[in-house]
Image (cartoon, rainbow, N blue to C red):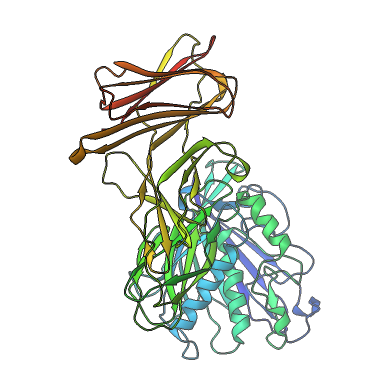
Amino acid sequence: MSLARGHLDRWLRTPLAGVALALALSATTLIVFAPTAAADDRGHGARPIDGVHSVTQGIQYFTDCDDGGITTDCGGAPGHWFSSSIPVQLCTHQFARPASLTAEQFRTYVEDATEMWNTTESAVGYEYLGDCASGFRWEDDNNVNEVGFDDSRDVVTGSAAAIARGSWFDIPFFGIPSDRRFVEFDVVIDVGGSIPEVCLRSVIAHELGHVLGFGHSDQTTDLMFNSFDPDDLSTCPTDATTAEQGLLQELYGVNAGPTLQVAATQVAVPGTTVTLLASATDPEGDPITFDWEQTGGTEVTVLANGAAATFVAPDDLAPLEFTVSARDSYRHLDTATIGVTLDTSTGLPVLQPSFALFQAGTGSLAGGSALGWSTRPDASSYLFCTNAPFTDGSETCTSQASSTAAMDWDTVVGTIGEPDVRRVFTTGTRETSMAACNAAGCTVGGVGPLIGGLRWPSWEMDFDVLAMAFDVPSANIKFTIGGVTNIEGPARRFEIYVGTAADPLQKRIHSCGNVAVNGVCFGLLTPSDQDHLTHLTIVSSRNGTPTTEHQIRIR
């Protein structure tokens, strides 16, 4: 594995007799001469961006040979980043920045360029870190990807506007590489105050295309075309074309960004604690991170916790506005805005919802069980929360319009197993609750049952289980409730027991017999019954399939 180095200069083009591109690869330097600037149909005002000026050949990737050949130094496998280096982190240096450009403008231009490349739905992305935490100017071989300005080192030569300097590993060390992986890239800019803002933005976006692995395009409308005319702003694109996005997807693979869902408007009462909730889905199942920002109204202190944010509503009745962002592991972004209006006329809902429903879901809830609580006439929304049982861990809550929620946290068994085994499950259930909410806030959550589910596709099992203890110690009242609903698959026999951790099958309280698909069965101990024990166990069986046993602690 050898370390190679290359660069592409972006030039500010004036008519030239010739422009050279030097690629320093391993110990070899390849010099390619391009045609004169007059060959470009953009005219005499056009300026080369970074060192190759040609309309007769396109260099699709940074490590390609200019003549399209393949040697031990270039051509063949294109360069790209190790997956462990994605998203590609980069930072900016302000040293030698021209006086016509403010530090904030420079940071904004770089950040906007990274966000543009993050919209290409490729399995690569940028994370812009702001100004570099160490050093004062860009440096080679420091394992930091930097964007800065040319200085006395004069690495940007001639009338070039910028240069991208990359280093990569050739794999294997000898012969034609089968893979090339970038280890560091620096972008060096030298534009002075001589070009319009949009053209400087275009130069930065172009150079960051090199950092991802692009060479130059021979299409004059492409971002990666190597010239622009500062007198013709249409030659300064700041977005990758559809074709360029496709090439990047070929290099890294396709990866779509997350999609946010929020309630666009919310009403709050001054002085109350307001909770804003968001949810997001990602097509590839990538982990999602959330970021909250207040973007309008009287300033409040926002306490963010993942997909939720809270604040105390101010006395000022002016509307508030908040923006939530969701990013996947490639820094692909989706944003949404939530508007909050203030209202002094509303009080909290009078009563909390009561648990009332457990059945197979239908419509949008099909494929799992539906859990329902009583509705409240003074509620405008509901807050459904789940939590690991008998813990003080943080709740997972979802704001919704209805007091009915879906059970969607099945335990899934991927192995086949033998038909005569007995499989015992002691985890997988969650505590549930439902609160009624309006502009004044939310009630305490109405307690629901412990709910869990099992899907074992190899044996056509898909059912959900319910377990609940309702105790009033001061009145010596106890209820013990167990239930099951068969979501899909052939009928199974279910039996419900109470017991202890040491003896979970101590007493059978109900035999359901065979429960068909969409069927529901309950077992109940009332206050007049004995044996309100600490565990409830649900056993399922069918001839020729494994027997399952869900042991659930309820007290």
- Which image quadrant is residue 549 in? top left
- Whether 428 is drawn above or below 320: the answer is above
- Whether 83 is drawn above or below 97: the answer is above
| Total residue callouts | 0
Q: Residue at x 45, y 56 (%)?
A: 376
Q: Position of 205 compared to 538: left or right?
A: right
- Whether 171 is drawn above or below 276: the answer is above
- Residue 33 visible within the image: yes
Q: Residue at x 64, y 74 (%)?
A: 238
Residue 194 in the image: x percent, y percent? 59, 89
Foreground residue among 71 and 529: 529
Q: Position of 329 compared to 20: left or right?
A: left
Q: Residue at x 38, y 70 (%)?
A: 132
Residue 125 in the image: x percent, y percent? 53, 58
Q: Residue furthest front?
A: 528
Residue 18 in the image: x percent, y percent? 71, 76
- Residue 164 visible within the image: no
Residue 136 in the image: x percent, y percent? 35, 75
Foreground residue among 544 and 255: 544
Q: Position of 439 compared to 486: left or right?
A: left
Foreground residue among 281 and 284: 281
Q: Residue at x 39, y 33 (%)?
A: 428
Q: Quadrant of the C terminus?
A: top left
- Whether 237 is drawn above or below 470: the answer is below
